[in-house]
Image: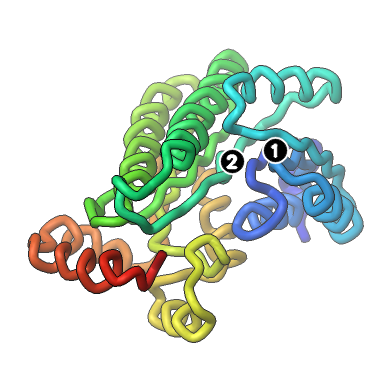
């Protein structure tokens, strides 16, 4: 453990498990204290206590439903009560589904928009204004390799992640002259329960380098954020795949639909 971020504070959303807890560890390892945000109660509280005991930093849990239209105001008020003025924010909270758009419930579609688009936008805006005025600060937003993939079954996930990428890249350039930055991470996949892959397929994907271990990805993404990079994509294969994904012919996309969606394999 080093102490390069001692005295600093970070807000991390979706912080109770998966890649979120690994982001917290990567920051805590550097001496950074945390405001950990999630919709859960007990898992979030236990994660905060665990990090405090392991790294000797301050970790404050805040249970918040980020799909609440007032989530940014609620977080701002909470930070005020704790007298915390964060130096970093990681917008990590997200959802995933693999299903045809017409078969997706209105509630699920609204959740994609509220969580990936509205919450990411409003939280980024809240911190961007503070960081611009302060002349320092780092934002890290989670997109996905799927933002380059108009694949059947991924309409809401890919399109909202594409929004996050474009939004964050533009915000990066807007903040650059003020000493602050916004970094977008677009992983090919992370070995968490989010995608629901069987263990054998997950191990294969990790071995091929298509899917990254959460701790490895989080460490490198945090390094990119701290350096003020505009974008981080894990793995050479994933970076090369962007071109090939973009030119994927229609017949391959239709095979994905017919073999996976129509047969219900991934539902």
Which residue is located at x 40 percent, y 27 percent?
171
Residue 183 in view: no
In terms of depth relative to the viewer, which is nearer, 109 or 228? 109
The relative height of residue 59 versus residue 218 in the rendered view (above or below) is above
Asked if residue 207 lies left or right of residue 85, the reply is left
Which residue is located at x 40 percent, y 37 percent?
164
> What residue is disc 2 on?
90
Location of the C terminus by quadrant is: bottom left
The secondary structure type at the circle numbered 2 is: strand
The relative height of residue 232 versus residue 83 in the rendered view (above or below) is below
Which residue is located at x 13 percent, y 68 percent?
252
Which residue is located at x 49 percent, y 86 percent?
200
**Which mark, residue 87?**
none
Q: Position of residue 204 (x, y in %)?
A: 43, 84
Asked if residue 81 lies left or right of residue 67, the reply is right
Q: Which image quadrant for residue 19?
A: bottom right
Q: Position of residue 173 (x, y in %)?
A: 36, 27
Marks 1 and 2: CB-CB under 8 Å? yes
Location of the N terminus by quadrant is: bottom right
Q: Position of residue 56 (x, y in %)?
A: 89, 52
Asked if residue 253 lies left or right of residue 123, the reply is left
10 Å crowding of disc 1: few (<14), some (14-19), many (20+): many
> What residue is disc 1 on?
10
Q: Position of residue 45 (x, y in %)?
A: 84, 48
Residue 168 in view: yes
């Amino acid at each position: 453990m080093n102490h390069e971020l001692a005295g600093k504070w970070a807000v991390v959303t979706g912080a109770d498990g998966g890649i979120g807890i690994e982001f917290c560890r990567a920051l805590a390892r550097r001496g950074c204290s945390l405001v950990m945000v999630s919709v859960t109660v007990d898992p979030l509280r236990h994660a905060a206590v665990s990090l405090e005991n392991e790294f000797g930093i301050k970790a404050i849990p805040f249970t918040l439903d980020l799909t609440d239209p007032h989530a940014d105001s609620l977080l701002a008020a909470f930070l005020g009560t704790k007298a915390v003025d964060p130096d970093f924010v990681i917008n990590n909270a997200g959802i995933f589904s693999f299903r045809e758009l017409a078969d997706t419930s209105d509630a699920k579609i609204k959740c994609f928009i509220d969580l990936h688009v509205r919450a990411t936008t409003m939280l980024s805006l809240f911190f961007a204004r503070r960081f611009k005025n302060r002349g320092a600060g780092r934002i890290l937003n989670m997109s996905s390799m799927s933002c380059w993939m108009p694949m059947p079954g991924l309409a809401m996930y890919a399109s909202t992640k594409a929004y996050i990428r474009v939004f964050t890249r533009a915000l990066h350039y807007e903040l650059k002259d003020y000493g602050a930055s916004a970094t977008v991470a677009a992983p090919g996949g992370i070995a968490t329960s989010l995608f629901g892959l069987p263990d054998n397929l997950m191990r294969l994907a990790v071995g091929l380098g298509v899917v990254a271990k959460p701790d490895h990805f989080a460490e490198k993404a945090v390094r990119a954020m701290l350096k003020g990079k505009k974008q981080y994509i894990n793995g050479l294969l994933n970076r090369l795949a962007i071109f090939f994904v973009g030119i994927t012919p229609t017949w391959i996309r239709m095979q994905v639909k017919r073999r996976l969606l129509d047969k219900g394999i991934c539902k």
